[in-house]
Every structure is written in structure tokens, then in C-alpha cells.
Image (spheres, rainbow, N blue to C red):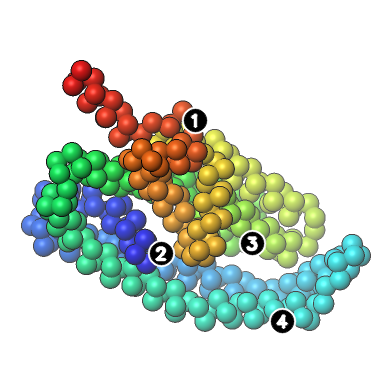
């Protein structure tokens, strides 16, 4: 929760300073918190909408789903992968119940993050004062530049991720409408939400609508078309559009992103997967600020992005002194 709250504060602080130009400080905090509450409410409604629609669709097509499951069990047995249908089915229902039971825990977790953000926003100006009282002028500049650089990276990452998520969700919805796949809007919203999880979210976003296509069309041609179309959408946006928008704003190498995603997912589960990239970017920027850890930033960054803004500013200061 602390890490997530820090990411949220870094993302919204620039908006807070913009609001302060037009409103008193107290109203500015209230407006910022209200905006975050609105985003949280929209996110909650979107998740609830997807869950209700998918559950209702499977209830309406239960016989088809059961027939598809039986055929899948038979196919797995032919390929030497014996699958106990009843046991696997029971596990599936148990997993679904577990997800529903954990929903309240998830919302409580998000509520605690919101509480930390609410009390953390007013502490940002106080943090600057504490830094001035604790460090010398040169140390102050380095620390403040590092913190600001981390905040900029987080805002850039979240902004680009939101834009590409919108593109992915819109393209998925339009494609589903074009091929006649039911729940087109649901699959679009699902892909929008999953796109915030790098790599893994893209893969998961393809599976549910593809499986539903097999259940809906009962043929091989249409589901294969759905799989190919969704894969093309994900590949184009992830490998062409996203790098073009990202540019040099995020200097992590692709391998670093995969490793970071695996590590933070192991540490914090789905929350770690969502926070993996901004947290790793923060670590890289912090490592660049110290000579003894600069080599870590070199290994984690792209080859042409090894020198950070801090390093360039130091070189500029050196030339001026010379």
C-alpha cells in the first residue's frame, strides 16, 4: 500500500499544483481527492460491469460451456494429458468463489491506499522543508532532482499506459462488434484494464474472448479469427504504438521489464505486476544518483539511455566550473 500510494501521489501531484493556481490550498486538496475518488469509482464500476456481464453470459449459455468443457477434456486425454473433468471443474468453481471472496479484501486494500494518499498529499510540501533542514545545498539539489525525475517517469508511464489502454480497449470493442462476438464492450473494458499489466496482461486479454468465441460460434473458423485479430491488435499496440509514444521517457530494457514483472509479481502478486515498471524506474534513478550503484542502472537501462538527466546536469556543472 505504501508503494502504491507513493506512485499515486507522484502521478497526481502535478495536477494538485495546477489546481492550486485557481483554488485555495484546502480546496485544492479536496478537489484532488475528489478526482481520485471519482477515478476509483469508475474503476470499481467497470470491474463490476465486466464481472456481472460475463457471469450472466455463462449462465445463459451453460449447456454450450459444459459441452465445450467435455470436448476439451476428451481432447486432452487423446494427447496423453489425462484430465479429471469433475475434479478440474470443481477446482474452477473453487477458484471463482475464491476470487469473489477476495473482492472485499481487494476493495479494502484500495481503500487503505486512498487513505494513505489523502494524508500523504499534504506531506509533500513538508517533505521539501525537511530535506532543506537535513541536507546541504548540493545534497538537497541531488535528492530533489532524483525525486522529481522519479515522479516525471511515473507520470509519463501512467499517461502512456492509459492512452495505449484506451487504444487497446477501443480496438478490441470494434473488432468484437465486427466479427459478431457477444459482450464486445465487456472484452474492450477487460483489455483496457489488463493493459496496465505489461506483457502478461496483453496475453490474458486474448484468452477470455477467445474461449468465449469457441462457446458462442461452436465452429473453428470464427474463434481462430478472433484469436488472430486480438493477437494482431495486441502486437501492433504493444510493439509499434507503445514504443513510439514511449520514446526515451522510459529507459528500461525489455528484459529488465520482464524480470521486474516476475519479481514484483512474486513479491506482491497482481499489485506488484501493476507497480513493477514505476518501481523499477525509481530504483534505476536512485542508483544513478550514487557512483557506487551507477553500474546497476547501466545494466537495467537501455544502452543509449545510460546517462540520466542527473548525470547530464552534473557534466554541465562541471563544464561551467571549468
The residues tagged by marks 1 and 2 sit, at their Cα atoms, a distance apart of 37 Å
Residue 128 in the image, given as x and y percentages of width and height: 16, 51
The residues tagged by marks 2 and 3 sit, at their Cα atoms, a distance apart of 20 Å
Q: Earlier in the sequence, mark 3 or mark 1?
A: 3
Residue ID for mark 4: 90
Whether label 3 touches label 1, CB < 8 Å: no
Residue ID for mark 1: 303
Image mark for residue 238: none
Res. 153 visible in picture: no
Sort mark 2 into few (<14), some (14-19) or many (20+) by Cα contacts within 10 Å. Answer: few
Query: Which of 79/295 is in front?
Result: 295
Rendered image quadrant of residue 316: top left
Please tell me whether mark 4 sits on a helix, a strand or a loop: helix
In the depicted structure, whether residue 192 falls above or below residue 73: above
Q: Earlier in the sequence, mark 3 or mark 4?
A: 4
The residues tagged by marks 2 and 4 sit, at their Cα atoms, a distance apart of 30 Å
| Residue in view at x 66 percent, y 58 percent | 207
Residue ID for mark 2: 43
- Quadrant location of the C terminus in the rendered image: top left
Please tell me whether mark 2 sits on a helix, a strand or a loop: helix
| Residue in view at x 47 percent, y 71 percent | 48
Residue ID for mark 3: 208
- Quadrant location of the N terminus in the rendered image: bottom left
In the depicted structure, whether residue 67 falls above or below residue 229: below
Residue 169 in the image, given as x and y percentages of width and height: 51, 52
Please tell me whether mark 1 sits on a helix, a strand or a loop: helix
Sort mark 1 into few (<14), some (14-19) or many (20+) by Cα contacts within 10 Å. Answer: few
Amino acid at each position: 500500500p505504501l508503494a502504491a500510494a507513493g506512485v499515486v501521489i507522484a502521478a497526481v501531484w502535478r495536477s494538485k499544483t495546477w489546481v492550486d493556481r485557481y483554488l485555495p490550498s484546502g480546496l485544492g486538496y479536496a478537489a484532488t481527492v475528489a478526482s481520485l475518488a471519482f477515478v476509483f469509482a469508475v474503476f470499481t464500476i467497470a470491474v463490476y460491469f465486466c464481472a456481472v456481464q460475463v457471469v450472466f453470459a455463462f449462465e445463459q449459455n451453460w449447456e454450450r460451456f459444459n459441452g465445450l468443457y467435455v470436448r476439451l477434456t476428451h481432447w486432452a486425454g487423446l494427447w496423453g494429458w489425462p484430465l479429471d473433468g469433475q475434479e478440474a471443474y470443481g477446482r474452477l468453481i473453487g477458484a471463482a468463489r475464491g476470487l469473489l471472496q477476495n473482492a472485499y479484501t481487494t476493495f479494502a486494500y484500495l481503500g487503505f491506499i486512498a487513505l494513505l494518499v489523502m494524508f500523504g498529499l499534504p506531506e509533500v510540501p513538508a517533505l521539501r522543508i525537511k530535506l532543506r533542514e537535513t541536507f546541504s545545498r548540493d545534497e538537497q539539489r541531488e535528492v530533489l532532482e532524483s525525486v522529481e525525475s522519479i515522479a516525471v517517469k511515473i507520470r509519463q508511464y501512467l499517461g502512456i499506459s492509459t492512452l495505449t489502454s484506451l487504444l487497446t480497449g477501443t480496438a478490441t470493442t470494434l473488432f468484437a462488434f465486427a466479427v459478431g462476438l457477444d459482450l464486445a464492450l465487456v472484452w474492450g473494458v477487460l483489455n483496457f484494464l489488463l493493459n496496465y499489466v505489461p506483457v502478461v496482461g496483453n496475453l490474458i486479454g486474448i484468452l477470455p474472448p477467445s474461449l468465449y468465441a469457441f462457446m458462442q460460434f461452436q465452429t473453428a473458423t470464427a474463434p481462430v479469427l478472433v484469436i488472430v485479430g486480438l493477437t494482431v491488435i495486441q502486437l501492433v499496440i504493444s510493439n509499434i504504438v507503445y514504443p513510439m509514444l514511449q520514446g526515451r521517457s522510459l529507459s528500461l530494457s525489455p528484459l529488465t521489464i520482464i524480470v521486474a514483472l516476475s519479481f514484483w509479481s512474486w513479491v506482491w502478486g497482481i499489485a506488484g505486476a501493476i507497480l513493477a515498471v514505476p518501481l523499477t524506474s525509481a530504483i534505476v534513478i536512485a542508483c544513478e544518483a550514487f557512483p557506487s550503484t551507477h553500474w546497476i542502472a547501466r545494466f537495467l537501462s537501455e544502452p543509449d539511455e545510460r546517462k540520466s538527466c542527473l548525470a547530464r546536469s552534473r557534466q554541465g556543472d562541471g563544464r561551467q566550473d571549468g
